[in-house]
Amino acid sequence: MARTIFNTTEKSNFILNMTEEQYAKLASYGIIGACFLVPLFTVIPECMITSTYTLASGGLAVTGVYCMIMALIALIKKYIKGSTVLPVCAFGAILLWSVVSLINSYDPMVSLYGYPQRGEGVLAILFYCSIFISAAAVKRETAVNALIKGVIGTGILNSAWSLIQIFTGNLSQYKKIDLDTKINAASGLAHSPVFLAMLLTLSLTAALITAAVTDNKKHRIICTVSALLFGFVMMFTYTFTGVCGIVFAVIAAVITSIAVKAPKKNLASVLAAAAGAALAVVIVSAGVISEVPTSYKLHDGRIVWWADSYMRLGSSGDYNRDVLNIDDNLEVYLYLNAKTKNIISNSPLTGTGPDQLAFPQIYTYGGLDETADLQDIIIQNTGIFDRCYNEYLYTAATRGIPSLIALAVVILAAVIVAFKKLKKDRSCGNAVVFFLTLGGALLFLIGCTSLPFSPVYWSVAGLGCAALSSQKKAEPAKEKKKK
């Protein structure tokens, strides 16, 4: 008989009577939302110049609030136990210490909501935590299938949008890499070529592993074509992240194929990503995009600093031409990391405050009043930046070393638990979850958290921690109990 409280009806007590299967189904909606809502909410600012990317935060808010409800249900129903306790507690510590950092920040409102159009404040961290917990509480493998479809699906959506940017230059903030050079860089609906490359790394890895392992011919064809598309678009991000993402996805697919002893003919699908990447290089070299034949090269420095932070958002000052060669990508990344380490040493405990890396670097108002718009003040300061493209350093700098330690615990725990599950059961789903969790952890060494990428990754990491049990194994247990 269904439980009720205070003489209420069964329908009004659905949480008390919710089964693990029902929870898994509802949590899957949150996982799908994490994959699609932010890019869908980004369509408006991409199409309308007058709109801002703050609208994308609406997609995260919808998913986040839904997952907050699911996370509360998981805690009430005591679904968080065993291997999921440590990472969930660590993520809770990240959230709590972010509040401490907010209290000691330069601007509490920016810490709460995030820098305008970045949106990576405490509220975003709360939503990421909710997404992680709701996924970690899932006990059914059906959620993994939803995850794989969602990750590949969002990759297709972003890549389709990217094709418009690549071949027309429309609907893009990255048509030129400087005032004269046209490259039509792809950012999809991910706000930045770097963020797109990070997202497509997950999508490509999921597609290649599925294509290499699955026995379903239809699924293999869809995933192979998707991999071809992802590889092509990732090269048009013109980033080191994109190149690393392709290499990682191919290695993950080959290792999985060998481990599960999949048919060798399936490995041919791995060539799809390489073929797509090679086609992109040929197109650029032939001058199809720039109208001038030129060799393919990466433009990380100009993209992350000039095109994204400075020109698109006004969240950074212009780069200092006297001390930095913006076309030397390694020099740019080393400069960002070195300066971030100095910021960490000045405030190691609580950091600058969430999403406020640029604030301690401000040294002039450029003739503006102190009450002037924040963006107007920041762009007056040559040589300052708001992202260092190493999430671990960025976390320590903005939210303190305690947050970095907690983040490391969450990611390490998720990777270890996901690996143990893969070692125990070498299924396609377990392989995808493990390599996506590992891939995201590695991407954080050369990239940073963002609204388009983080909800997807924390869904994956949450499922990596989840104590999944297949429906086939669960049903006999129920029958035995009845007897």
Image (tube, rainbow, N blue to C red):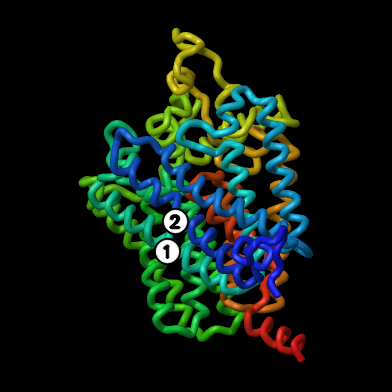
Q: Residue furthest left?
A: 291
Give residue 225's quadrant in the image. bottom left
SS class of the residue under badge 1?
helix
Horizontal relation, residue 72 to residue 201: left or right: right
Q: From the image, which quarter does the C terminus lie in? A: bottom right
Amino acid beneath label 1: Gly
Asked whether disc 1 touches disc 2, contact meaning CB atoms under 8 Å apart, the reply is yes
Which residue does the image show at 70% across and 43% down from the upper left?
A: 94
Q: Is residue 255 visible?
A: no
Q: Position of residue 407 (x, y in %)?
A: 69, 47
- For the residues labelled 1 and 2, the Cα–Cα distance comes to 8 Å
Who is closer to the viewer here, 96 or 76? 76
**Horizontal and vertical percent position of residue 150:** 47, 64
Identify residue for label 1: 153
Q: Residues within 10 Å of mark 1 (few under 14, many from 20)?
A: some
Please name the amino acid that badge 2 sits on.
Phe
Identified at 45% across, 23% down, the residue is 375
| Residue 195, percent from left and from top | 47, 47
Q: Which residue is mark 2?
A: 36
